[in-house]
Amino acid sequence: MSTMSFSDTRVLTGRSLRHILRSPDTIITTAITPIAMMLLFVYVFGGAINTGTDGSYVDYLLPGILLITIASGIAYTSYRLFLDMQGGVLERFRSMPISRSSVLWGHVLTSLVSNMISVALVIGVALLMGFRTGASFGAWLAVIALLVLVTLALTWVAVIAGLTAKTVDGASAFSYPLIFLPFISSAFVPTSSMPGPVAWFADHQPVTAIVNSIRSLFDQQPVGQELGYAIVWLVGILLVAYLAATALYRRKAN
Amino acid sequence: MKSPTLTAGSIEVVGIEKSFKDLQVLRGVDFRVEPGSIFALLGSNGAGKTTLVRILSTLLRPDEGTAQVNGFDTQSAPAKVRESLSLTGQFAAVDEVLTGRENLVLIAKLRRVPNPGALVDELLERFSLTEAGARRAGTYSGGMRRRLDIAMSLIGNPSVIILDEPTTGLDPQARSEVWDTVRELAAAGTTILLTTQYLDEAEQLADRIAILHQGVIIQNGTLAELKALLPPSTVEYVEKEPSLEEVFLALVGTDSSTGGNKS
């Protein structure tokens, strides 16, 4: 059974990766907005922002930009899933002798691949803009692992949106608040500069813990408790979204 | 896929009821489809045809009653049912981004066909899609899409094929192509359940016709049996004029290899 679903997942992932190969613009558009934001913040606002650190602003900013990249990239998963549902393709798969979860996993793994490509593009531009890190191989692996976890958690949220959407626009609209969330975190400015209640929110939402962890890893600083918070948040979101998405998918059979 | 049991390829529906909230769509449906026959479920829009099709293909659970496909119960052995049948839904469910060939290969891989390449070549040939095979399915005409859709359903040799309104929205040529395909399939021993709202389609194709009306089967029989329900016909002499369809087909030709092809 598990080897069967693994093979089905592989075939279905291959299928949606082909979709991405045929429309590489989805990866480019995912990367363009975060890159534009990075240019704007580094070359326009950055000079006026006091981060209280010695490094350059692009070093400070990059972790948050990477999260925005992922938050905008996952919307394509809802979009593709919605189109599969609308066109009857999902129905065809569900009436075939294949493992049911493989249909969703195919989309999720595709999201992982395409988001990692977008993230690599954004990091490439950041390097051109002067981003530097002395992070060890291990620290890089930890950063990548965190970004993979972020992508998986948010993609499962996107699956819920795709399965419940009534229109194409609705399928991707859910990601706007996610893109906005990094602005009320330590991604662009230190939370200590915000008024009390806003700072409290920023300090207690997952983006701050994730951003600070990635920043420390790039900065060769000890990550401390925040990495723990980040992982607990992400695993929590991942589990809840995964269970909700698979339950929704099963309930569609009734 | 021939097997010696009596249930091979059959469909058995007993007392199926299904409601959506307060709306009772199916109110006790019973019928049986004999192996290798063509069974038409005739009904107007909203009669409950698609709901019934979804129950048979394990996409929906009935509130009451049982449905068996190929001798397997849709609720206790859904995996076996899915192995036994192929569903061709109301909207040609093809992946528009993939080419026709890639669509077929995808299904062949999912159905674990040992040598997908050879089978796919054969299917493209059989459905006059060899030239179009390298083009994205999104560029196909309605008739080509439907042909590809049906070709996808044949992969894995299911003993039962369910066609939900297979010719809705097709032009006359594409429609007669689909009819030919259905006849070929039945001749090869596949059991076919098709739903339709077109009376002539049921008349042309089906061994048995069941009329689904307001959630129940109100009549079930052969065409001759159904015709016998009305008073015997009287003989009238009328001048035979060609139907518009005959004129249309005579003018544009019925060659299926060019029919429905955009290019």
Image (cartoon, helix red, strand yellow):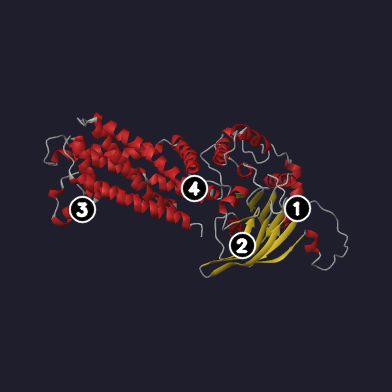
Image coordinates of residue B81 in percent, x first then y, are: 60, 52
The residue nearer to you, when weighing B149 against A149, is: A149
Q: Amino acid at mark 3?
A: His
Q: Nearer the viewer, mark 1 or mark 3?
A: 3
Q: Do callouts 1 and 3 point to residues on the same chain? A: no
Q: Earlier in the sequence, mark 3 or mark 4?
A: 4
Distance from disc 1 to disc 3, alpha carbons, whole Å, reads 69 Å
Q: Which residue is mark 4?
A: A84
Callout 2: SS = strand
Residue B95 lies, with reference to residue B73, above or below; the image says above
Label number found at residue A217: none
Distance from disc 4 to disc 1, alpha carbons, whole Å, reads 33 Å
Image coordinates of residue B79 in percent, x first then y, are: 56, 51
Q: Which residue is mark 2?
A: B66
Q: Amino acid at mark 4?
A: Asp
Distance from disc 3 to disc 2, alpha carbons, whole Å, reads 53 Å
Q: Amino acid at mark 1?
A: Gln
Q: Do callouts 1 and 2 point to residues on the same chain? A: yes
Could you tell whether A146 is left or right of B61 in the image? left
Viewer can see residue B262? yes
Q: CB under 8 Å between callouts 4 and 1? A: no
Could you tell whether A249 is left or right of B75 in the image? left
Q: CB under 8 Å between callouts 4 and 2? A: no
Residue A143 lies, with reference to residue B219, above or below; the image says above
Distance from disc 1 to disc 2, alpha carbons, whole Å, reads 30 Å
Q: Nearer the viewer, mark 3 or mark 2?
A: 2
Chain letter of the residue beneath label 1 in the structure image: B
Label number found at residue A204: 3
Callout 1: SS = helix
Q: Earlier in the sequence, mark 1 or mark 2?
A: 2
Image coordinates of residue B129 in percent, x first then y, are: 64, 36
Q: CB under 8 Å between callouts 1 and 2? A: no
